[in-house]
Structure formats: structure tokens, C-alpha cells
Image (cartoon, grey):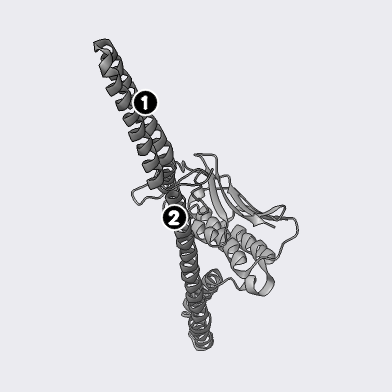
Amino acid sequence: MRTRTLLTQVLAVNSLLVGITAIVAVVVTRDQLGGAASNAEGLLLLALAVFSAVLLNSLLIRRRLEPMERLVRTMDQVDLNAPGMRASPPRWAAREVQKLTTGFNRMLSRIEDERRQAGRAVLRGQEQERSRIAQDLHDEVNQALTGILLRLEATTMDAPLALRPELQETKRLANQAMEELLQLARQLRPTALDDHGLIPALASQVEDFAQRSGIDARFSRHGDMPSLTDEEQLVIYRVTQESLSNIAQHANATQVRVQLSFVGRTVLRISDDGAGFDPGPGNEGPNGRPRGRVGGLGLSGMRERALLIGGNLALFSSPSEGTTIELTMGAT
């Protein structure tokens, strides 16, 4: 069926309505010469014809406007956190509706592309800033602490015996500060990811987490790793890092499993047996964060990172049943 404009359709229906009315009027005028009975029948016929024409007009216009209502419903349902939704008018929709739908879909594509590019620029800037801070911590602060340790060592050699225990304790604290700074620098910029690749970096991250927290944490890999971009590898690493950090702070877990699968799709799954929480609507705290874990999960940041690489981040949790974070990327 060839597409007609709304104006053409309305004009056609109204022309039909006028034509029917004219024909009925002619019939009524002719029948008036036949007496009162014929006149009453003519008026009834005129009323039925007008009613039928109006009903037909209403049905046709409503059918032609239904694609517009469908487009409005799609507009209401669009969520930029779940990109890819597009309006799809039926083939018989009016030309204006099809043009409006095409324009709306193009606008959505532009918004999603611009949002993705802006997000990538922001995350790239964050990573650069983290790298700079990590470098400063390693080069400047760490060197300053090293100098302090050397001076303490020299002072200890010449110090009275009564002061040596205090100086030894100060050295211990300085060494502890150095270790914490190096650990912070490694968290800010994952050098293991740059030096050894994704799989060894994740294994090292999980092992370090287990040693620091005392939680039974294990990492497993399934399938052969495909060719992933630096951005995709960084997102996987950061999602793991954020998830483990929140487990250590809020979950009260005894076991953590980090699984990275490349079978069919790239799927990262971090699960714990901790307290869990109800992630459903209506369970947010005063800051809009899920109740049950003070400070939230940083889910918005993780979801944003997932979207920027065309992935999806899902959360599964319930009270006393633990929590699972699942990052899914496209087919390998």
C-alpha cells in the first residue's frame, strides 16, 4: 500500500463524507414529492448516512494516528542507560510519521554517540589524572620517605640506646607508609595490566585482595582470550577492582569468586556470599544508594564504563544471599 500524507488522507475521507451527504440530499429532495412517509424515510436515511460517514472518518483517522501514539510511547520508554531502543512505525504509517520516526531515531543515535564519546573523554581524563598522581606518589612522596628512612638509619647508629627502640618504631611506621603509598599507586594505575596483560593482572589483583582482606578469593578463566582493546581490558580490570573494594568494605563475605569467561561472549562475574541487599526500587538510602551497603556499590560508574565499550552490567542480590556483579560484552 502506497504511503499517503495525513493531509491527503483527511481530504480523501472528508471528500467522501461530502459526496455521500450530497447524494443523500439529492435523494431526500426527490423523495419529498412523494409525501410525508417518504420524507421521514429520507430524513432517517440522511441521519444514517451522516452517522456512518462520521464513524468511518473517525475509525480511519484513529488508525492513521495510531503510529504517532506508538512513537510517543517509545519516546517515554527511552533510557540512555540502555541504548539501542528505536521506534519502528508500521509500513502503512503516514509519510509524516515515518519522517518523524526516522528523525527521532537519528537524534537518538547522535545523542548516544555523543554521550559515548563524552564519557570516553571523561574516563580517559580520569585515567590520565590517576596515572599522574600515581607517578607523583611513586617518584616524589616515595623518594621523600626513602630519604627519611636513610636518615633514620644513620641516626639510629649514633643514637643512645634508650632512643633506639623509638627510632626503630619510627622506621617501621615509615616503611608501612611506603608500602601503603605503593599499594595506592598500584590501585590508581594498574601497572600489572600494562606490563603483563589482563589475565595475570586480574589473578594478581584477586590474590592481593585475598591477602589483604583474609577472604577466600579465587580467580578462574574459561576459554581463550580474544583480541580485546586496551579500553575493554581496562573496564574489566576497573569493574573487578571496584567490586572487590566494595566487598571488602560492606559485604562481610567469607568467599569471593571472580570468573572471566570467553566462551561465546566475554563475561566477567564477581560473586560473594556476603550480606547482600535488596536492589529493587524503594530500597535506596537518603543518597539514592542501595540500602544494606554503606556508601553504595559505585554501580553508576561501573555501568557507565560498561556502556562505553558496548557492554552491559547487571547486579543480582538479595538479603543474606550474597551479591553477583556481571559484566557482559559482545560476542567474541
Q: Earlier in the sequence, mark 1 or mark 2?
A: 1
Give the image location of residue 52, x and y in percent. Answer: 36, 25
Q: Amino acid at mark 1?
A: Ser
Q: CA distance from mark 1 to mark 2?
A: 37 Å
Near mark 1 (Cα within 10 A), the count class, few <14, some 14-19 or many ≥20, is some
Q: Nearer the viewer, mark 1 or mark 2?
A: 1
Which residue is pictured at 48% across the width and 71% down the height?
A: 121
Which residue is pictured at 27% across the width and 10% down the height?
A: 37
Q: Amino acid at mark 2?
A: Phe
The mark found on residue 104 in the picture is: 2
Q: Residue furthest top?
A: 37
Left or right relative to 303: residue 265: right
- Element at label 2: helix
Q: Nearer the viewer, residue 210 or 323?
A: 323
Q: Is residue 63 visible?
A: yes
Which residue is pictured at 30% across the width and 18% down the height?
A: 31
Left or right relative to 286: residue 281: right
Residue highlighted by disc 1 = 52
Number of marks drawn: 2
